[in-house]
Amino acid sequence: MSPLERRCRWLLLAYPAGYRRAHGEEILGTLLEATPQGRKRPYVRDIRALLVAGIRARAAENGRMTTAANLRLAVLLGIVLYLEPVAVSDAEDFAQTTGRTSGLYTGPHGVPALLAALLLAATIILVWVRRRPILIGAATAAVGAVAYSGLFQGELSDSQFSAGMDVGVVTTQLLCLAALMVLASWNERRAWGWLWMTVAIVAVFTLPFFFQTLVHQPHIGLFLILGLLVVLAAWTVTDARPLVAVCTYYLIASMPMMLGGAIAGVGGWFYDPVVWIFAVITGLAVWRLSRQSVLRTKRGAS
Amino acid sequence: MREPTYFVLASLLAGPLHGYAIIKRAEELSSGRVRLATGTLYTALDRLTAEGYVRLVSEHVVGGRIRRTYGLTDDGSGALRAEAVRMAEAARLVTDAAAEPHRGRLGRKPRTA
């Protein structure tokens, strides 16, 4: 493969996968014919036109789905964004149990924690496989494992607020699993690329905490998260779903604090400006999404 | 109708062509003024196919890659001619006025003092 063809193939990634499968080779052939022999890079105007055309093709693809279908996918992604680190955390709990040296650790542990991690991961993957009976079986088993390891196995915290938070975390996870089962009942096509995108976003959210200790830059995590939000806000020009998903994730992630506050009778979340900022961003992103989606069936039409 | 679209349709008047041939023909017809980028061409072809102005005529494999040939439909031919007539009428407003310089812009004699 020539350097020109390799670069052109990279450019074609601007188009959605389905479009690339249908037209990728044809566009590539024309692009190579239109570029003089011996040249290693495509012309700037060809690069610009391909990027613009690819982004337009992606936007057109969103327009084939209704607002409700696009919103369901975005909320589903937000839930998956929340559950993926939970599964990793449960696996860590198991690892901590097997490798712990002190008796201070009192959280979920042992086989139930590992089972919860595996069942959560299986449920997430089954949402994409679209085998609903198996998904419901796995999600129901995950509900049991999460509830057992979270509520009955570990010791609840002493303070009322922290105990409320503990209950809030488990309740949020159970609600997320229930929502996954409901959302998966719509048999829409879910591209695997979306699942890998959530894995990448979770990595962006999680890895900074590892780098933080390496590079001694306490704000690196915050910068990366803000950077991600800026990129997703810019991407709403083409597709508002990733931004809706990340906002959904944040609102779900703040639920344990809300529930903990409600149980302790504090309700401090109400005055948390970040929650309100995310609520406003979510509203704007959903509005943008409704503009990008095709309208539901016309009034009176079947 | 935008100029690149007009020349894409015009390039297919003589018969079906594949992507690169459309780019070359449009450049020739416009005396080098319209140089279609590949991405622009396929966006235009997608839109024109959806509107029923262009149709896929044939596809075959050349050098291991698929090559599709596109042709003009009757609707596309009609739309192109209608656009040509509209542009000719618009041009005539100017060329006729230039041929009769003693008349004003709206065909009235200029006022004299």
Image (spheres, rainbow, N blue to C red):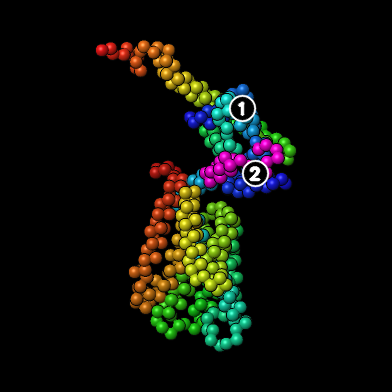
Q: Is residue A175 visible?
A: no
Sort mark 2 into few (<14), some (14-19) or many (20+) by Cα contacts within 10 Å: some
Point out the image quarter for the C terminus of chain B.
Answer: top left
Where in the figure is residue A249, as x and y percent of width and height?
A: 47, 63
Q: Is residue A102 above or below residue A145?
A: below
Q: Is residue A282 above or below residue A36?
A: below
> What are the residue bounds of the magenta stretch?
A35-57
The residue under label 1 is B25
Pointers 1 and 2 in contact (C-beta within 8 Å): no
Where in the figure is residue B15, as x and y percent of width and height?
A: 63, 24
Query: Residue lying farthest left?
Result: B113
Q: Is residue A164 left or right of residue A115?
A: left
The residue under label 2 is A41
Q: Is residue B19 visible?
A: yes
Q: Could you tell me which residue is drawn at 48 percent across and 66 percent down?
A: A222
Q: Could you tell me which residue is drawn at 61 percent across and 47 percent down?
A: A11
Q: Is residue A55 magenta?
A: yes
Query: Secondary structure beneath disc 2?
Result: loop
